[in-house]
Amino acid sequence: MRRFLVALFVAAVASFMSGVASAQVKVPESFILKGNPMGAVNFPHAMHTKLPGVKCTTCHHPSKPQKPAKAAEEKCSDCHTKVATPPMTTTYAMAFHAPMYKSGLCADCHKKEAAAGKPAPTRCPQCHKKSNG
């Protein structure tokens, strides 16, 4: 009887987890990243989620012990603020790329894609536009 109950429990958990894994996460088509004096960036979120090798955790990294996450996928600005207030050490801009676009999450990926001949923006005005608001 105990083996039957354990097997039933395992089957129920497996069934639940398969439903969770197949559930579609609602992602916005795009949104505007504001605050840069060069202009806001229209970030095509849905398009980035369809790129091979890109997972949610590529950008929405696990929280740090100093700043625990409030949700599985938070906005970058929930933790990374314009001025890095302790315990955070990375500003909002630096979360995307270092000054002069030398490195960072967006810069590294865009440079890699461009080097492979794919159409990834690599110059500031290609992403930062005053018209984005």
Image: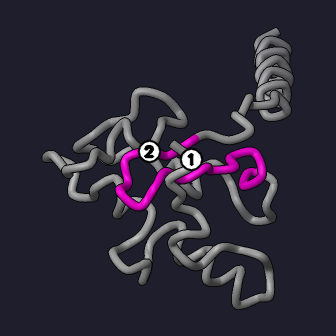
The residue carrying mark 1 is 132
Identify the residue at image location x=77%, y=52%: 47
Q: How is the image coloured?
A: one colour
Q: Nearer the viewer, residue 106 or 119?
A: 119
Q: Residue at x 40, y 27 (%)?
A: 70
In the rendered image, residue 92, in percent from the top left (x then y), is placed at: 34, 53
Q: Residues within 10 Å of mark 2 (few under 14, many from 20)?
A: some
Q: Which residues are magenta?
A: 32-49
Given contact means CB atoms under 8 Å apart, are the residues at marks 2 and 1 in contact? yes
Number of marks drawn: 2
Front residue (pair 133, 9)? 133
* Residue hosting label 2: 34
Q: Provide residue 32's location: percent of width, then percent of height.
A: 55, 42
Q: Secondary structure at mark 1?
A: helix
Q: Nearer the viewer, residue 121 or 65?
A: 121
x 15%, y 46%: residue:
85
Front residue (pair 128, 12): 128
Mark 2 vs mark 1, foreground winner is 1
| Residue 117 tag number | none
The quarter of the picture where the N terminus appears is top right
Q: Is residue 25 left or right of residue 73?
A: right
Kind of residue indicated by mark 1 = Asn
Circle nearer the N terminus (2, 1): 2
x%, y% of residue 84? Answer: 20, 51
Magenta stretch encompasses residue 42: yes
Q: Is residue 15 above or below residue 94?
A: above
